Image: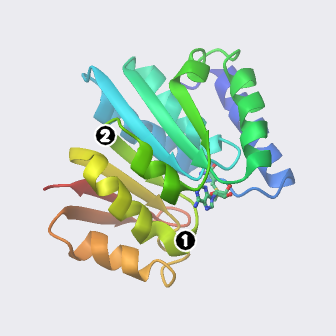
Amino acid sequence: MDTDSFISFMRKLKERCRQAFVPAISERCGRLLKILVQMYSSHREQFNVLEIGTGLGYSTLWIAKGLLDSNVRGEIYTIEINLGRVETVMEILKEANEIEGLVGVLNMVKLIYGDSKEVIPKIEKPLDFVFIDAEKTEYLTYLKLVEPLLNRNGIVVADDVISHKNLLKDFLDEITGSSMWETVIIPIDDGFSLSIKVK
Ligand SMILES: C[S@@+](CC[C@H](N)C(=O)[O-])C[C@H]1O[C@@H](n2cnc3c(N)ncnc32)[C@H](O)[C@@H]1O
């Protein structure tokens, strides 16, 4: 997987995020997301991902790399509320599409400008994998909106569950307490929750 051109593109993008003060997951969280997506999508005919909170597309591209490396037909819907960021991400996706190991990403990623709370109910595709990384006080709202769209055994990963555990209390209570979910908290950087929809 570690084509020099892919990793070098991702490191430059991470630096661009830092300079623009746009938060992004760490490289090792990116690798974890990539591996999870690649694991779950392999041997599937179609695999649909939703990302809530695009930022500058750093996590989007790790997810896309997982799908590209598993060679599965898939779509990634990614929602961003900040118009300037959406415009920048469109340019970044075009640049990424020229990079060895990321060719095809431009068709795969459906970048949507808007508030996730309004956009998610309009998504008509069944989802297999959801990554939540937007407004911390709204995680539970996002979860409730994606529940009906997510296939059985579908996966939800959420970022910042350790660094922002107080703000995320209602969300964490739900994914650890509801019979719909089985969850493990992964103590990696700001903390990932990994949940599978069992009902
Ligand atoms: C932490 S950043 C995302 C970083 C990105 N996931 C990454 O790791 O590269 C959170 C993003 O969510 C966006 N956001 C906040 N509330 C949102 C909402 N309701 N709908 C869509 N995007 C939202 C912010 O504008 C910001 O760009």
Left or right: residue 136 compared with residue 4 = left
Residue on which disc 1 sits: 136
- SS type, badge 2: strand
Residue 118 locus on image (x, y percent): 51, 55
- For ligand 1, give the image quadrant: bottom right
Check the picture and name the quadrant holding the C terminus: bottom left
**Amino acid residing under circle 2:** Asp
Residue 149 locus on image (x, y percent): 30, 47
**Amino acid residing under circle 1:** Lys
Q: Can see residue 195?
A: yes
Residue at 24%, 54% (x, y): give it. 196
Quarter assignment of residue 8: top right
Quarter assignment of residue 70: top left
Residue at 40%, 70% (x, y): give it. 140
Of labels 2 and 1, earlier in sequence is: 2
Residue at 30%, 38% (x, y): give it. 126
In this view of the protein, which residue sits in the foreground, 103 or 76?
76
In this view of the protein, which residue sits in the foreground, 109 or 172?
109
In this view of the protein, which residue sits in the foreground, 193 or 143?
143
Q: Residues within 10 Å of mark 2 (few under 14, many from 20)?
A: many
Residue on which disc 2 sits: 128
